[in-house]
Amino acid sequence: MPHDTPGQSLSPSASAGARPAWRRRTLLRLVGASAIGFPVVATLAACAEDDTVHAPDPLAAQEVMARADAAAATAAIALAPQSNAALSTIAAERTAHADALRTEIDRVIGVYGDGTTPVHRTGALTVPGPGGSPVPASEVETASAQPATVAQVRDQLVRSQQAAAALARTESGYRAGLLASISAACATQAGVLLT
């Protein structure tokens, strides 16, 4: 069979004879590619990142509030050094609350065999604001960095206590107990330590 070289063209009879062989090769390539390609594409599609937006874990807002309370109590020491002991205790307890909440959130998410945790997109996280209406968690985190008065820390703890109590009524088992315990601790902190 003659080879087509630059500057040389095949005669109509030669190109007609080459056409069926080219079609057979193309067909064989397609069949071979599909036998390998379809399973590979299906596997890659299954491994592709899920675009579903999940609701945040209900305990996530409580964790943000606990860390914000701890930061506010620490910042309030600058304005009320006479309450250093009480505010330091509150900061330590609220940090422990946040850590316990994070541990529970991570337990529910689970861990893969290699030690990593699943990653998925979640919706915007909101927490109860000063007026009771939900506000973005980022606002609470930013505000907690500012020095606060003891009265402001007390108000913040009361909101945290109420939010934990309300959420405890909707949860069950360990989660309900954890939230009830946090609610009781916040009530003690606001009503006893900061009076």
Image: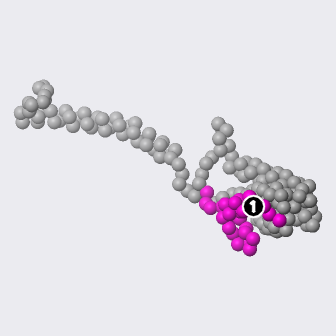
Q: Is residue 45 above or below residue 81?
A: above
SS category of the residue bearing label 1 = loop
Quarter of the image where one finds residue 77: bottom right
Total of numbered circles in the picture?
1
Q: Based on the displayed image, in which of its 4 quarters is residue 83 positioned?
A: bottom right
Which residue sits at x=20%, y=34%? 22
Is residue 107 shown above or below 15? below
Image point (47%, 43%), residue name = 44
**Could you tell me residue 180's position as x and y percent?**
84, 61
Quarter of the image for the N terminus: give it: top left
Residue 105 % position (x, y): 72, 52
Residue nearest the viewer, comparing 131 with 26: 131
Which quarter of the picture shows residue 190?
Answer: bottom right
Q: Is residue 81 left or right of residue 23?
A: right
- Which residue is nearer to you in this view: 190 or 167? 190
The residue tagged 1 is 146
Residue 157 visible: no
Quarter of the C terminus within the rendering: bottom right
Kindly identify the residue that appears in the image at 80 percent across and 63 percent down. 148
Dot 1 amino acid type: Gln
- Classify residue 57 as left or right of residue 90: left
Residue at point 13% right, 28% down?
5
Instruction: Please state the horizontal and vertical placement of residue 170, each as a whole percent of the image.
Output: 76, 65
User: What residue range appears in magenta?
Assistant: 122-149
Alpha-carbon neighbours of circle 1 within 10 Å: few (<14), some, or many (≥20)? few
Question: Magenta stretch containing residue 126, yes or no?
Answer: yes
